[in-house]
Image (tube, helix red, strand yellow):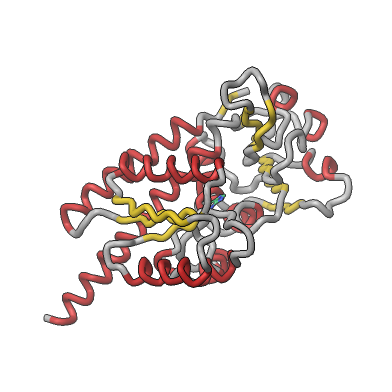
């Protein structure tokens, strides 16, 4: 069994993004990412901090935007409209979940698809589903990169995805099923209403688990030699840790790792890839904006 080293692969991706960002800075300007956080949910604060740190490492300018949890809807939407119009901002990330009664859908719709580096806008989802180029959500894109860079080509394999969220399950199923690089798998999508989950997971050559519940997958649910991608990030109380908790995935790692051929750990598997792909999406947005600026300048002359 091989542990897939997400930290190392993510560092490779960030280094490639840094090289691309440096080249763009010399011909245009540095890529820019607005990072919007409402409230102080500890997990969200730690994700956002990690995203801003990755920007600095990649030569991407981050524009931190912080609001209290009780930010009025109009204030948040007004700020998104300002960022959407700002030429130095290539991408806008609004950390989810939003606090209290703020309407996530309304906020996601307020971001133009050409700055939607999270890939959560329905236009981005529609592009992915229909084979148009667009922004792919970062965690699913990171999962496919992890597979390819570990020597696992999904083509011709049976991939079973557990979880049907808009952020992970549905887009990763679409990516693995689409034509071409990183796709061409036969995909089964399981969810909370799937009876006898193990019947499906035991058929998987590649098993992707994204439900947010520890212990969802035990050893008897995995085919020997399968590749297991654990997307879960769950905090479980642990008095022996300084923070009082530790992170575990959705897969029972100790039980499943002897059965799998490859498996991602939690932490250090999918998590770092999500951030690396956000950097890659921001560079892509900046390149598109550079090309558009060049076309406009050319048209004016
Ligand atoms: N919350 C959990 N995952 C994500 C993500 O990929 N992007 C954003 N914006 N919020 C999240």
- Residue 127 visible, this orientation: no
**In the orientation shown, which residue stands out farthest toward the left?**
301
The answer to whether residue 247 shows anywhere in this view is yes
Residue found 31% across the figure and 60% down from its top: 286
> Residue at horizontal 16%, vertical 76%?
298
What is the x, y in percent for residue 107? 53, 67
**Residue occupying the far right of the picture:** 195
Residue 248 horizontal/vertical position (percent): 65, 31
Residue 45 in percent (x, y) is at 49, 44
Q: How many marks?
A: 0
Left or right relative to 119: residue 34: left
Up-down: is 299 above or below 131?
below
Residue 291 at x, y = what percent?
26, 67
Among all residues in the image, which is located at the extreme top?
240
Q: Is 65 rendered above or below residue 215?
A: below
Residue at horizontal 70%, vertical 37%?
250
* Left or right, residue 5 beside residue 18: right
79 relative to 271 in the view: left or right: left
Q: Quadrant where the C terminus lies?
A: bottom left
| Quarter holding residue 89 | bottom left
Q: Residue at x 50, y 51 (%)?
A: 138
Q: Which quadrant of the figure contains the N terminus? A: top right
């Amino acid at each position: 069994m091989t542990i897939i080293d997400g930290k190392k692969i993510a560092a490779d991706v960030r280094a490639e993004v840094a090289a691309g960002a440096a080249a763009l800075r010399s011909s245009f300007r540095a890529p820019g990412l607005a990072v919007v956080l409402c409230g102080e949910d500890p997990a969200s604060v730690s994700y956002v901090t990690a995203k801003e740190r990755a920007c600095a490492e990649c030569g991407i300018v981050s524009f931190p935007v912080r609001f209290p949890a009780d930010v009025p809807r109009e204030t948040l939407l007004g700020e998104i409209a300002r960022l959407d119009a700002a030429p130095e901002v290539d991408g806008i990330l609004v950390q989810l979940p939003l606090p209290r009664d703020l309407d996530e859908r309304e906020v996601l719709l307020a971001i133009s698809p050409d700055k939607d580096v999270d890939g959560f806008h329905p236009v981005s989802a529609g592009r992915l589903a229909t084979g148009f180029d667009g922004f792919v959500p970062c965690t699913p894109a990171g999962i496919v990169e992890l597979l390819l860079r570990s020597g696992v080509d999904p083509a011709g394999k049976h991939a079973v995805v557990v979880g049907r969220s808009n952020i992970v399950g549905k887009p990763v199923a679409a990516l693995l099923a689409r034509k071409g690089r990183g796709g061409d798998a036969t995909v089964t999508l399981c969810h909370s209403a799937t009876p006898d989950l193990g019947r499906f997971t035991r058929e998987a050559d590649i098993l992707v688990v994204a439900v947010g519940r520890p212990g969802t997958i035990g050893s008897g649910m995995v085919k020997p030699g399968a590749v297991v991608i654990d997307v879960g990030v769950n905090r479980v109380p642990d008095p022996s840790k300084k923070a009082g908790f530790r992170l575990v995935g959705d897969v029972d790692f100790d039980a499943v790792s002897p059965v799998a051929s490859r498996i991602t750990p939690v932490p250090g598997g999918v998590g770092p890839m999500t951030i690396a792909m956000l950097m890659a999406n921001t560079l892509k947005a900046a390149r598109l904006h550079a090309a558009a600026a060049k076309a406009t300048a050319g048209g004016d002359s």
